[in-house]
Every structure is written in C-alpha cells, then in structure tokens.
Image: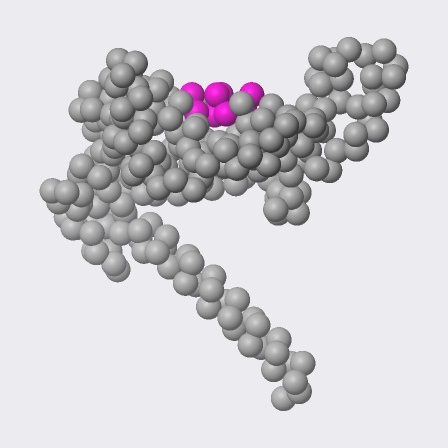
Amino acid sequence: MSGGRSKAVVLWGLTVFSLILLSFPTLIIIGASFTAGDIIRFPPEGFSLRWYERLWQLDSFKDALLRTFYVSIVCTLVSIPAGTLAALGILRYRIRFRRSLQVYLLLPFTIPLVVSGLGMLIFFGELRILGSLWPVGVALCVINLPFMIWAVSASANALDSELENAAANCGAPPVVVFFTVTLPAVMPGVITGALLMFILAFNEFLVSLFLVDSRIVTLPVQIYNSIRSVITPDLAAVSVVYILIAVLAVWLLDRLVGLEIFLRSK
C-alpha cells in the first residue's frame, strides 16, 4: 500500500471513529426513549411511544417547556441590540481603553457559572425582582453575550468601511447609514448570534438553578429535579426534544445564513 493511500485510510478511519464516538451518546438516548420498559435501557425493551405520550400529558413538562421558551426569547431579544451595538462600537469606532472594554465585555465568558449565578442571585435579590421569569432571561443574556459579540464581529470584520463612507458622502444621516448599509452587512452575524443565544439560554441549567423557584421552574432545572429521585425513560424523551430543537436551529442557520458562511466566519 502506497504512502499516500495509507495516509488517506488512516485519516478516513479517524474521521469515521470520531463521528461514531460523537454520535453514540445521541443514538443511545434516542433509542432509550422508545423503550417499552419502565427503566432506561439500551438496547430498548421493545418499541413504544408511551413515554412521549406520557410526556405530553404532563402539565409540569409543558409549563416548564413554555417557561424555557419564554426565557430564551427574552435572552435573544435583549442580546440582539446589546451584542450588535457592542461589537460594532468596538470594531468601527476609536474608543479610549478599547482593549480594556473588550476584556470587560468578554469577562462573563471567563467567570465560572457558579460565581455568575450567585452574583445574579444577589443582584436581582437586592432589586426584589426574583420570582419573575424575565430576569432569568436577562441573566442568561449577560453570561452568554460574548457569543453574540463574536458572531457580529466576524461579519463586521468583512464589512468594507468605504461602503459606509460612500453612503455618508451621498448625504445619508448616520442612522440611515446604519440601517441601510451596516446592519444588512452584519445581518448574517446577527442571525448566527441570535440562534446561538437562544440555544444557549434554552440549555442553561446552573445559572437558572440560582434564579428560579418552584413556581417558575425551567425545563433544565426540572430535569435535574427529576433525576435526583429516579431516572425514567420520559427523561430520555425530554432529551430527544432538546436534540430536535438543536437540529432545527442548525437547519435555520443553514437556511438563513448558510453553514459555509458560519464556519468560514469562525
């Protein structure tokens, strides 16, 4: 076997092994969710949709799912203007202490989530707004905002500043230049960042655990509370719901932005 062919065989072998290793947990949890038995087991005991039916009949699950969607939407709506303006402000304008500001905006990404959750608990407690869902969405926006800034910055770096100068020279006010030139140019980054923020907020557990109570439990917290007592196949069905939402997000990203643009922006 020639050296080039041996190299190709090794590379393909490693690629296939990596794909199997990455997909194996997902395949196991999907298979376990269709079991006809009463405990999580793989291979499953027969095939049944009973756990999906039971899941949909649980009001606690539906309420927690709706709360999680609400929190994720709040996080996304807050992050779009905040992250977009922060990214453009840092990249397009000469700001004093620019490097320090960049470090400050990326600080939530480096702080452990336990510390962030405790800090948010104390802060919102002092404001006496704990017990509502919207502060949870704001908190998740704060800790994940660097992802939004990164996504918009990737698009803004590819923007030719001469386009903005040309629009300004034609008499367009700064606000018009922003909405007609700058914003459309960075829209792929805005969409990418918004989808990332939604998914991250939808999956976030630790910070949510600090900020919710028994009346406003989100889905990740409810899963955690459930596995503390007994692990049943309906939890596998919940995990499949998460997988479907992630697949939907990737599909939307491909349709709205294009996966090749997203990967190239990294």
Asked if residue 19 shows in the view, the reply is: yes
68 in relation to 107, above or below: above
* Of 116 and 51, the residue lying toward us: 116
Residue sitting farthest toward the left = 229
Judge from the rendering whether residue 25 lies leftward or rightward of residue 55; answer left or right: right
In the picture, which quadrant includes the N terminus? bottom right
Residue sitting farthest toward the bottom = 1
Q: How is the image coloured?
A: one colour
Measuring from the top left, give residue 217's x and y in whole percent: 24, 26
Q: Main secondary structure of the magenta part?
A: helix
How many discs mark residues in the rendered view? 0
Judge from the rendering whether residue 216 lies leftward or rightward of residue 163; answer left or right: left
What residue lies at 27% left-to-right and 24% top-to-bottom? 122
Quadrant of the rendered image containing residue 43: bottom left
What residue lies at 34% left-to-right and 24% top-to-bottom? 136
265 in relation to 81, above or below: below
Measuring from the top left, give residue 264's x and y in whole percent: 66, 47
Quadrant of the rendered image containing residue 220: top left
Asked if residue 57 shows in the view, the reply is: no
Measuring from the top left, give residue 123's x and y in whole percent: 31, 21
66 in relation to 44, above or below: above
Looking at the rendering, the stretch of residues picked out in magenta corresponds to 74-81
What residue lies at 29% left-to-right and 38% top-to-bottom? 114
Q: Is residue 72 shown in magenta?
A: no
Measuring from the top left, give residue 38's x and y in whole percent: 14, 48
